[in-house]
Amino acid sequence: MNRTVTWGDALVVAAFHSPGGLKSAVTAIAREVGPHIGNRNTFAKLLRVTSPTDLSEKDRWRAWLLLAAFGEDPRDWGILDQVVPTSIDRPALLERLTVRPKGFEPPTF
């Protein structure tokens, strides 16, 4: 039996390997961007996507955020930096979004 692994399937693996999984990633995203970006169900639908080309512009932005929270480089997943609004400091957001194991969080002052 052959099975094709989709983009969403790979995202499930990334979620599994991220500290706290999808829940922690969505919490970090809401903290940094605001709850208007979506809830856990909004982000969970990305796990069922076959290819990033199937995503709307807003969902590509959500995918970028989710991958960043997982500690992944969104560009490696086919999500280009152009989806990040120009008003956002992308490198700073990448640093703040990454979910880390307990004890490895960056200091907050």
Image: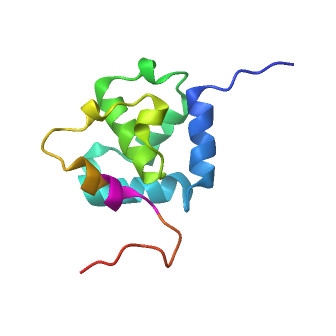
| Residue drawn at point x = 42 percent, y = 73 percent | 105
The colour scheme used to paint the residues is rainbow
* Furthest residue toward right: 1
- Looking at the image, residue 80 sits to the left or right of residue 66; the answer is left
The answer to whether any part of residue 34 appears in the image is no
Quadrant of the image for the C terminus? bottom left
Depth check: give the residue in front, 41 or 23: 23
| Residue drawn at point x = 57 percent, y = 48 percent | 15
Predominant secondary structure in magenta? helix
Q: Is residue 81 magenta?
A: no
| Residue drawn at point x = 32 percent, y = 35 percent | 61
Image position of 74 with respect to 2: above or below: below
| Residue drawn at point x = 32 percent, y = 55 percent | 30
The quadrant in which residue 66 appears is: top left
Q: Position of residue 89 (x, y in %)?
A: 19, 50
Q: Position of residue 101 (x, y in %)?
A: 53, 69
The answer to whether any part of residue 39 appears in the image is yes
Q: Which residues are magenta?
A: 94-99
Depth check: give the residue in front, 66 or 40: 66
Depth check: give the residue in front, 68 or 75: 75
Quadrant of the image for the N terminus? top right
Q: Is residue 98 magenta?
A: yes
Q: Position of residue 36 (x, y in %)?
A: 25, 46
For the image, the number of numbered tags is 0
The quadrant in which residue 4 appears is: top right
- Looking at the image, residue 45 sits to the left or right of residue 37; the answer is right
